[in-house]
Structures are given as structure tokens and as C-alpha cells.
Image: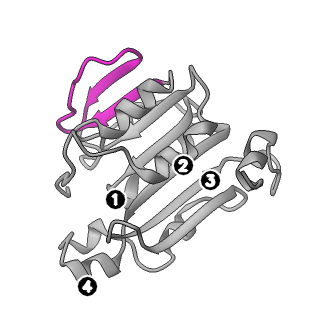
Amino acid sequence: MARDTSTPADPPSAWLARFAPLIAPGARVLEIACGNGRNTRLLARLGAAVTAVDMNPALEPLEGVRYLTADLEAGGCWPFERNAFDVVVGVHYLWRPIFPRLFESLRTGGLFLYETFTEEQFRIVGRPSNPEHYLRTGELLTLVPAGWRILAYEDGLTDHGAFYQRIAARRCAVKNALPPEDVRLCQPR
């Protein structure tokens, strides 16, 4: 498993912050690989009911946060029911075998927010060094199930000098249906 290189003082993921307005108070959120809790704190401030999972979660007492210590790469029984969450969040973590489980855990209409390193990050920066921990060009688009609504996708250099793929997708009952709450992301501010 890749090591969390962020610190508790670091701001939350800019990708997560961008789509935070789509997370309603009380939304059931699964955050995998929560690490030191920098993204967990943002989700808690939104009033979400967060299940934060990590091998070594921060365990910072936050209202609305349930911590689960688990090794998602160990296989075995998936600890969550189908359609249990309104939002699934993953930042700087990649374990391809759990993607089908993540998708099954998201209810119809739910929001999938994910970002992690790309192969360009390795070629230029040299980490993560394990090829299982970075995405190939365009790979994240292929992992999201067909028929889901892609709200946004990025693949490239971020403003802080890292190479990521990022996706925001909604599990739709009807192909290409854009829910009203997503329309505001498309409107000029």
C-alpha cells in the first residue's frame, strides 16, 4: 500500500472541495484510505455521516464520523452492503480489485469522487514507485461503469505540481440524465 505523504495540516483535496457542494448534510459517505483525516475533516464539516476507512485511520474524534480500521487489500468479506452510500470518496489510493465493490456500495444517484497519481507522476517525480499505485493514461475513465454520468474528468499536471487523474461521476438510473443539482456545476459563476 502506498504511504500517505500528506500531513494533517494540509488542505483537503482540491477535487473533493470542488464537488463538496453536491454533498448534502446527512449524506452517507464512504471515504477509503482516509489517512491522516485531511479529507475526513472537510466531509464532517459538511454534516455528512462519514465512514472513514484505513489500515491506520487518524481516529480524530469528529461528529458524524465512524472510523473503520481495515486492510482493503486483504480480500475477504467486503464490510459494506450494496447501495449503502450516497457518496464514495478515494484520494491518493489505488487498489484496482476493490473498484467493483466501491461501485456496488454506491446507491443509484450517488456521487463517486476519486483522484490518484498517474504514470507521469512516476516518470517525472519517481513516486509512487509501485506501478500498482498509479493509473495509466485514461485508465480511470475505463474503471467507471458504463452508463454512469461523468460530471468531470482530468488527467494531467495539477497546480501544485503533481500528476493526477480525477473523476466525478454519478451512478445514474437513466443514461446521460443530468440531475438538477449537477446543473449548477455547468453554469458560470
Q: Which mark's residue is nearer the viewer, 4 or 1?
A: 4
Q: Is residue 99 visible?
A: no
Residue 141, above or below 47: below
Q: Residue furthest front?
A: 189
> Which numbered circle lies on residue 18?
2
Q: Which amino acid is tagged 1? A: Leu
Residue 178, above or below 105: below
Q: Which mark's residue is nearer the viewer, 3 or 1?
A: 3
**71 displayed left or right of 154:** left
Which secondary structure lies at badge 3? strand
Which secondary structure lies at badge 2? helix
Q: Earlier in the sequence, mark 4 or mark 2?
A: 2
**33 displayed left or right of 189:** left
Q: Earlier in the sequence, mark 4 or mark 1?
A: 1
Q: Residue at x 49, y 62 (%)?
A: 166
What is the C-alpha distance between the residues marked 2 and 1?
21 Å
Check if residue 50 falls in the magenta segment: yes
Q: Quadrant of the N terminus?
A: bottom left
Which secondary structure lies at badge 4? helix
* Residue of label 4: 123
* Residue of label 3: 169
Residue 161, horizontal then vertical, whole percent: 32, 71
What is the C-alpha distance between the residues marked 2 and 3?
13 Å
Residue 181, horizontal then vertical, whole percent: 75, 39
> Which numbered circle lies on residue 14?
none
Q: Which mark's residue is nearer the viewer, 2 or 1?
A: 2
What is the C-alpha distance between the residues marked 4 and 1?
17 Å
Residue 20, above or below 141: above
Boundaries of the magenta span: 49-70
